[in-house]
Image: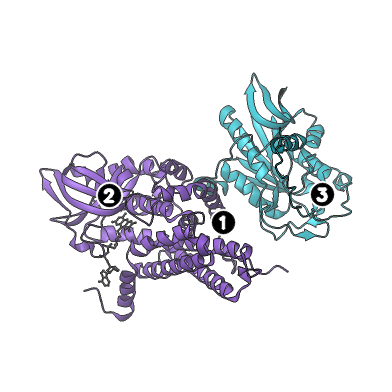
């Protein structure tokens, strides 16, 4: 099975973000493999261990993004492709999907795995767009994965439980944070990663129209999230439990 | 513009290569996720979570600096970074890895027969087999040359008699590397757990390194086959060469414990308010934090330098003494200073500081006390031995 895992290098979410105009500064800041993508890499590795095949990591980002790919390789992925091009600075989710689709289409694939959304941009639209551009079905918000009779069957997280959905290969699947427990890279894995195939491409090496690389989306304003306000204090007048239950219901927690 | 990073002021990360950084980050994460959440409780209950050993093995950290037989052949700086990150969680885990890799696997790898290497090393690298190292005796610590434990020939067998004390991992070890005197000088023996005449007894009333097993090994006419002896070395240089390996790791580890104390004190000082101000805003607190930060950066720089010397095959035992003496004593004083910044909270296991402080008391003593390392350095620069 040829498994592609889309991964993203993002500024370390544990550090305060630095802005570059209306964009998050990405170069010269401490970056990590998006924690959400580790679940995708792990899912890919487990399917490979079960069914055989190869796991290829694909990423679009600055040259520094190779750190994220290297981490995925040291977890056990077989090879990596990085599309890095100055012209992609400020690319929106649609441009990203076009670039990744063009890179993925260069070879045969059975399954493309991505996180539900990135931990920096949070648009959550890239994987669905990618599936459309690749012309394949998509299974989203996956919390459990199974392959039987040559079909992919997953549990799909919903607001009040889960659905079981399945489709044929090739397809796109997005994984949630609960889907598995990502492994640690081993020292041997880290050393082996150095020798694994690593390809860096510019957009001119992909079949994609220059016009398709112009972001249609423009960020016109960025503002800080409101400081968290002090919580509401409910003195217990005997109705405390009911009010807590109502509150949790409104928050859709129960 | 943001100034230097308070956690890596001199940008020492830049002295590491990509693989070293990735390894450091991986072990830091493992320590944060798998060790830190449980360590307060393990320390309080004086328990070493043996279940984590195969996980540490799977990461490839056991005997990682050795070549072959399931070991990865890592560079000295990589091994050092692992020691640092583990000890930032707790000295007990760094002790475990030091003993397993440098004190038990190293002599088997370096002085063992082919059969011994194949029998023990792959399982030890995987964390399925635990090893320990018995040199110290109840009556002989700094001066192991007087050891009483002896091995005498009977036919082709060896008969071992005597006792070892303060042996890390002793009670959980599947195999003990034991040093004993013979007619032919000090020799090393591999004693599997369960050999008749070999028993262990754990030392229970420790207030330091509580999340680490420390035991006595007792040999009472313990009969071993000829193949139990390490053929490749005789004399005290056998055990001393192992200690030099392990001490090297402590140079790094001590800075891990110190870093944990500094980071804890720094965070605490920024949030704890007295007299309407964060205590970090008081000059005396800043003095303490700055002194800690400077010594940690210097000690880490020293560790990296010694590691590069080791990788080039140019590190002398006296330079290892320099590193061990300097970094452990600074780590201990950093832990004590950090404790004062935390006030009363500093004495509880809610925070890592007093645990590190107590652990470092052992680290100051084992693998050559600070006095002994001072004398080794004194001898190196004056030419006079002041030991006897
Ligand atoms: C937690 C823990 C784990 C340990 N694990 C192991 C292990 O796995 N394997 C093992 O073999 N050992 C182990 N040890 C033992 C350790 O190596 C010894 O404790 C150490 O060598 C010191 O020996 P001692 O305790 O007998 O002290 P002593 O040698 O009795 O020293 C007592 C004091 O006298 C000083 N002193 C001694 N001689 C001189 C001198 N000539 N000049 C000046 N001062 C001197 C010392 O520096 C020290 O301050 C461990 C110890 C601890 C605490």
Residue B367 is marked as none
Disc 1 versus disc 2: distance between alpha carbons? 33 Å
Residue B177 is marked as 2
| Residue A54 can be seen in this image | yes
Pointers 2 and 3 within a single chain: no
Tell me the residue at 40%/59% (across/down): B359
Determine the chain carrying the residue at label 2: B
Q: Which residue is under mark 1?
A: B21
Q: Position of residue B202 (x, y in %)?
A: 29, 48
For disc 3, the neighbor class at 10 Å (few under 14, some 14 to 19, many from 20) is: some
Q: Is residue A245 left or right of residue B98?
A: right
The quadrant in which the C terminus of chain A is found is top right
Q: Indicate the colour of chain A.
A: cyan
Disc 1 versus disc 3: distance between alpha carbons? 29 Å
Q: Is residue A156 above or below residue B301?
A: above
Q: Is residue B307 left or right of residue A59?
A: left
Tell me the residue at 32%/71% (across/down): B371
Q: Secondary structure at mark 1?
A: helix
Determine the chain carrying the residue at label 1: B
- Which mark is in front, 2 or 3? 2
Chain in purple in the render: B
Q: How is the image coloured?
A: by chain
């Amino acid at each position: 099975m040829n498994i592609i895992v889309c991964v993203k290098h993002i500024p370390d979410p544990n550090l305060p973000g630095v802005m570059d105009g209306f964009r998050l500064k990405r170069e010269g800041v401490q970056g990590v493999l998006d924690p959400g993508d580790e679940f995708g890499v792990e899912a890919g590795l487990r399917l490979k261990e079960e069914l055989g095949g190869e796991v290829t990591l694909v990423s679009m980002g600055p040259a520094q993004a190779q750190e994220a790919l290297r981490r995925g390789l040291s977890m056990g992925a077989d090879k990596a492709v990085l599309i890095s091009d100055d012209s992609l600075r400020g690319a929106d989710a649609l441009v990203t999907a076009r670039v990744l689709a063009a890179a993925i289409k260069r070879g045969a694939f059975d399954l493309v795995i991505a996180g539900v959304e990135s931990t920096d941009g949070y648009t959550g639209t890239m994987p669905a767009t990618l599936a459309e551009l690749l012309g394949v079905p998509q299974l989203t918000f996956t919390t459990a994965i199974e392959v039987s009779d040559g079909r992919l069957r997953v549990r799909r997280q919903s607001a009040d439980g889960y659905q079981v959905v399945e489709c044929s290969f090739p397809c796109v699947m997005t994984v949630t944070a609960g889907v598995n427990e990502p492994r640690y890279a081993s020292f041997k894995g880290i050393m082996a990663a150095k020798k694994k195939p690593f390809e860096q491409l510019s957009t001119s090496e992909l079949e994609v129209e220059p016009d398709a690389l112009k972001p249609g989306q423009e960020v016109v304003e960025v503002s800080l999230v409101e400081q968290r306000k002090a919580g509401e204090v409910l003195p217990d007048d005997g109705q405390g439990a009911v009010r807590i239950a109502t509150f949790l219901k409104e928050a859709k927690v129960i | 513009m943001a100034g230097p990073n308070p956690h890596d002021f001199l940008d020492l990360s830049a002295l590491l290569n990509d693989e070293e950084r990735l390894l450091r980050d991986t072990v830091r994460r493992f320590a944060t996720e798998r060790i830190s959440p449980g360590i307060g409780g393990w320390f309080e209950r004086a328990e070493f979570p043996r279940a984590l050993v195969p996980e540490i093995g799977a990461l490839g950290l056991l005997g990682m600096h050795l070549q072959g037989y399931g070991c990865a052949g890592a560079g000295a700086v990589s091994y050092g970074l692992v020691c640092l990150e583990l000890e930032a969680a707790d000295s007990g885990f760094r002790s475990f890895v030091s003993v397993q890799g440098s004190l038990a696997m190293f002599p088997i790898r370096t002085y063992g027969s082919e059969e011994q290497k194949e029998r023990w090393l792959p399982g030890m690298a995987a964390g399925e087999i635990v090893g320990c190292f018995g040199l110290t005796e109840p009556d002989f610590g700094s001066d192991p040359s007087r050891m009483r434990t002896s091995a005498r020939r009977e036919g082709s067998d060896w008969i071992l008699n005597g006792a070892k004390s303060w042996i890390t991992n002793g009670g959980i070890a599947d195999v003990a590397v034991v040093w004993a005197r013979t007619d032919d000088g000090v020799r090393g023996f591999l004693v599997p757990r369960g050999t008749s005449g070999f028993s262990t007894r754990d030392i229970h009333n420790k207030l330091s390194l509580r999340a680490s097993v420390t035991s006595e090994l007792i040999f009472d006419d313990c009969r071993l086959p000829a193949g139990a002896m390490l053929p490749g070395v005789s004399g005290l240089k056998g055990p001393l060469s192992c200690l030099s390996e392990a001490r090297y790791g402590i140079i790094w580890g001590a800075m891990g414990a110190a870093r944990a104390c500094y980071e804890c004190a720094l965070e605490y000082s920024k949030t704890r308010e007295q007299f309407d101000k964060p205590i970090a805003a008081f000059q005396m607190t800043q003095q303490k934090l700055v002194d800690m930060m400077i010594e940690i950066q210097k000690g880490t720089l020293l560790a990296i330098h010694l590691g590069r010397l080791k990788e080039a095959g140019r590190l002398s035992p006296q330079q290892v003494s320099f590193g061990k003496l300097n970094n452990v004593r600074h780590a201990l004083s950093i832990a004590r200073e950090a404790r004062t910044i935390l006030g009363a909270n500093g004495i509880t296991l809610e925070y890592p500081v007093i645990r590190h402080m107590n652990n470092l008391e052992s680290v100051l003593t084992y693998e050559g006390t600070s006095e002994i390392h001072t004398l080794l350095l004194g001898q190196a620069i004056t030419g006079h031995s002041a030991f006897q």
